[in-house]
Amino acid sequence: MSHDLLVHGRLAPHELDGLKERWTERVEHHGVELRFHPDFNPAFHGGYLPAMLVLRGGGLPGVDELVARRLHVGFDLYLEWFESMEDAGEGLEEVPPEVATVIRSSSFCAVFTLSVEDSAGCALGAFFAAVRLARLAHGVIVDPVEEVFWNPDQALQAAGSFFSATFPLRRCQRPDRPFDGW
């Protein structure tokens, strides 16, 4: 089983400079450190993205054993950049107006794939990378399966219920492995 989370947001071309560094800053509310592979370039990426994840605090169900461990994680990430989504009226009729406004003004859509074929750390890495990108780009996170739309703060508040009900980490099949460098 896999689960996609979409991030729609707006970044100007000059904001791509240093995006990787700003993107990996700690997600404050959950004490998460996430570092992407040194070769990662957000302007030209599509596919598997290796990363290092450290959870500094608890608060999420089923991950206490991962706290304070440096984990080698990775997830599928596809970024699509475009000039404008202003014509994206189709399919947005049922979306809250403030979300539709963000989607129409977005300059990119990022698709993060969480998979039970991966480890719990990989799923958490993808989730927190999506939250951080949405925060940087003043964007929204869309769960197309559950038809949920979150701003970054709402996503952090919903993290516990998302992982316990929608995407249970206990179903992840691969064990987490320690980070031992690139």
Image (cartoon, rainbow, N blue to C red):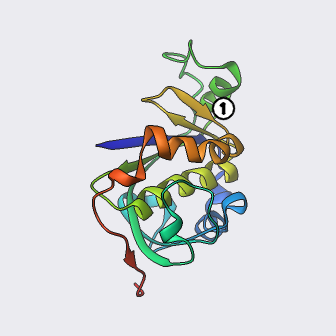
What residue is shown at x 45% (from left), y 75% (from top)? Answer: 71
Would you say residue 81 is visible in this rendering?
A: no
Q: Nearer the viewer, residue 99 or 180?
A: 180
The structure residue drawn at horizontal position 63% and vertical position 55%, both measured from the top left corner, is 132
Q: Pick out the residue farthest to the top.
A: 93
Is 26 positioned to the left or the right of 60 in the image? Answer: right
Q: Residue 148 in the image: state x and y as whole percent.
A: 55, 29
User: Of helix, strand and loop, which one carries label 1?
Assistant: helix
Q: Residues within 10 Å of mark 1 (few under 14, many from 20)?
A: some
The answer to which of 102 and 158 lies nearer the viewer is 158
Query: Is 109 drawn above or below residue 15 in the view shown?
Result: above
In the rendered image, the vertical position of residue 119 relative to residue 61, given as above or below: below
Image side of residue 69 versus residue 9, left or right: left
| Frontmost residue, 32 versus 57 | 57
Read off the residue under disc 1: 102
Which kind of residue does numbered mark 1 sit on?
Val
